[in-house]
Image (cartoon, grey):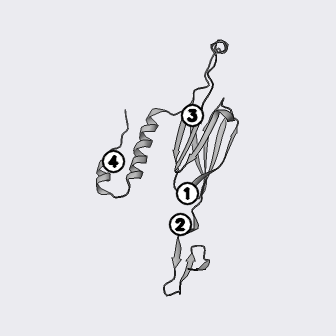
Amino acid sequence: MRNSFDLTPYRRSTVGFDRLFDLIENNARLQQSDNYPPYNIERLDEDRYRVTLAVAGFKADEIDITAQQNLLQITGRKAEIAESDRAQYLHLGIANRGFERRFELADFVRVERADLADGLLIVELVREVPDAMKPRKIAINGKGEVIDIAGDKNAA
């Protein structure tokens, strides 16, 4: 059975949420296609995340990580096993096929580092909101004083 979302009624009654609806529809479409390699997404802190992919059998030079604006793309390319080598296997259960996994990132999220150990690719992500985008309080009749949420006073 296929799970599909019809977001048409919401698109008609909202303004400016097109990107969000596109993300939901694309994610639903991709989830139905392939679940390889398996992965976890963890929230470590308010602004820190970790994506862990199970990439058994892949070496660091066979994996490519590309971070673009609002997109993290992880690609694995495995060399084909020669037919002469394949005959030596009694059971070939570890997937050696290539993969491409995409993760949509929120604004201001960047890749901090990536490590490969024990068959797990770990990608650390950090959200760094620019100071100009952080919430701040504006004093009324305060002669131009601006107080950020942390409590520091700045002259505007």
Mark 4 = which residue? 7
Q: Is residue 126 above or below residue 135?
A: above
Q: Is residue 68 above or below residue 147?
A: above
Q: Amino acid at mark 1?
A: Phe
Task: Tell me where residue 36 appears, x and y as whole percent.
Answer: 54, 33
Q: Outermost residue toward the right?
A: 117
At label 1, counting other C-alpha atoms closer than 10 Å, the crowd grade (few under 14, some 14-19, many 20 or more) is: few
Q: Amino acid at mark 4?
A: Leu
Q: Nearer the viewer, residue 65 or 151?
A: 65
Give the CA distance from mark 4 to mark 3: 29 Å
Identify the mark nearer the N-term, 4 or 2: 4
Q: Disc 4 or disc 1, which is closer to the eye? A: 1
Q: Secondary structure at mark 1?
A: loop
Q: Secondary structure at mark 4?
A: loop
Mark 3 = which residue? 37
4 and 2 marks in contact (CB < 8 Å): no
1 and 3 marks in contact (CB < 8 Å): no
Q: Quadrant of the C terminus?
A: bottom right
Residue 118: quadrant of the picture: top right
Q: Is residue 16 above or below residue 131?
A: above
Give the CA distance from mark 2 to mark 1: 10 Å
2 and 3 marks in contact (CB < 8 Å): no
Identify the mark nearer the N-term, 4 or 1: 4
Mark 1 = which residue? 108
Identify the mark nearer the N-term, 1 or 3: 3
At label 4, counting other C-alpha atoms closer than 10 Å, the crowd grade (few under 14, some 14-19, many 20 or more) is: few
